[in-house]
Image: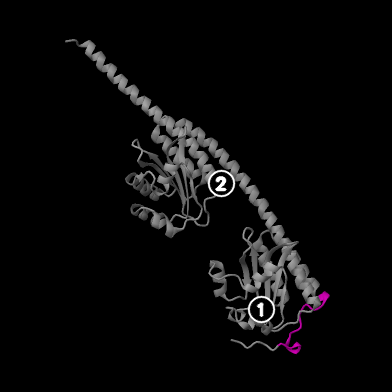
Amino acid sequence: MAEPSPNTDASRASDPLSGVADQLGPLQAITSALSRSLTPDEVAAVVIGHAYNALRASAGSVFFCQTTTGELRYAASRGIAPAAVERWLDGSLPSPEVLAQTARTSEPQWYETYAEFVAAVPGASQALTSPERLQAVVVLPLRIGRRTLGVISFSFSEPRHFGPEQRDFLLTVSEVCAQALDRAHLFEAERSARTEAAEANRRLQMLSEASKAFAESNRDFSSALGVIAQSLTEMVGDSATIALISLIKGDGTVMENVAARAKDPEFAEELKAFAREHPQRLGQGLRGRVAATGEAVFIPVVDKEQLREEIEPDYKPIFNRFKLSSIIVVPLRAHERILGTISLSRADPRRPLTAADLSVVQELADRAALTIENARLYESSQRAIRVRDHMLALAAHELATPL
């Protein structure tokens, strides 16, 4: 490990941006690049690109504050030890305390030598990044008004004096970066709102089409089940989504899996066979509990170990095969009576099911329950008609052939 440089003015390098004339060109280049940045990631790229180069830094990092929790999230870096970056990305290493402190206080931190940095920041000497890259360190808040949106840091390979002009320049850089980040957040929010509105319209259209399809199939019980399962996967599904329809049998103690659908044809057949062979007891498992209570279950992110402990042994092979990452189970309710459940599962952890998915699945289930009830009533009436016709035929035969 390199020895810290002595804390003397003679040992500190002069800043390459020591005058206003030297600062104007780089600042214009940074501002121009930021004006074209439409996402937070693009803002981060400018920080570790244009700003990093203008400062002749040896390392730099960008962390953004989470909107909901305020915790720092790694966004980008340059010159940082790969081991640190990997652990920041997987969450096994918290953000550096020196950055967290700036996020909490919204105050910049200036360390002109490695000795100052180590003395002021606990654990700095144990940083994974080489001390040779940390001979001077500056940490700056990305602040808009009273809101701190993130933190950026730069370090240098030799001690550096941060005079008034240098500090003004760095604070100006952090200010324009914060403004760009705020614009990017607003742009993303607007784009997300447009996307959500378009998705809501798409789902309303699909609900309308599903209702029409249900109405056309409500005289054929098997066809109705197939149409319902297909509508589910089309509405919120992709190649990593499966739908399962389970109905309570006549004795009221067991649920029969009557329809299954997945876009992967091979898995769809495997799922159908499994569903037929493994009925679910009422009150047991997720589907059994939903059927017993009438309350939906929504698990946006599955705790695989916990779920593996809860599911019945017979279900573990299909669980391991599909690797569920998100689950919705809703009741099929018609006229205050629970007929069964609809289950929707996804195996793509990058696209968890959402509250909007839960809402549309429950809406579809309410319409599907009426279709199932109508199909059952129709089949029952057809059986009664067949019995009646058979009895009339027997009576006519008896009348036609008296003793």
Q: Is residue 161 above or below residue 344?
A: below
Circle 1: residue type: Ser
Q: Is residue 400 left or right of residue 205?
A: left
Instruction: Tell which tag, 1 or 2, sits nearer the viewer.
Output: 2
- Is there any visible trace of residue 61 in the rendered image? no
Which tag, 1 or 2, sits closer to the chain's start?
1
Q: Which residues are magenta?
A: 7-21
Seen at 68% across and 70% down, the residue is 102
Q: Main SS type for the magenta part?
A: loop
Count of residue discs:
2
Q: Is residue 342 above or below residue 74?
A: above
Q: How is the structure coloured here? A: one colour
Q: Residues within 10 Å of mark 2 (few under 14, many from 20)?
A: some
- Is there any visible trace of residue 230 in the rendered image? yes
* Residue named by callout 2: 356
Q: Is residue 328 above or below residue 217?
A: below
Asked whether the residues under the numbered discs 1 and 2 touch, taking CB atoms below 8 Å apart as contact, a structural biologist would say no
Q: Position of residue 221 (x, y in %)?
A: 39, 33
> Disc number at residue 330?
none
Seen at 76% across and 79% down, the residue is 162
Instruction: Look at the numbered disc 1 and give the secondary structure of its residue.
Output: loop
Magenta highlight on residue 19: yes
| Marks 1/2: CA–CA distance | 46 Å
Magenta highlight on residue 209: no
Q: Position of residue 41 (x, y in %)?
A: 64, 63
- Quarter placement of the N terminus: bottom right
Instruction: Look at the numbered disc 2 and give the secondary structure of its residue.
Output: helix
Which quadrant holds residue 179?
Answer: bottom right
Q: Position of residue 73 (x, y in %)?
A: 61, 65
Q: Position of residue 116 (x, y in %)?
A: 69, 83
* Residue named by callout 1: 58
Seen at 23% across and 14% down, the residue is 397
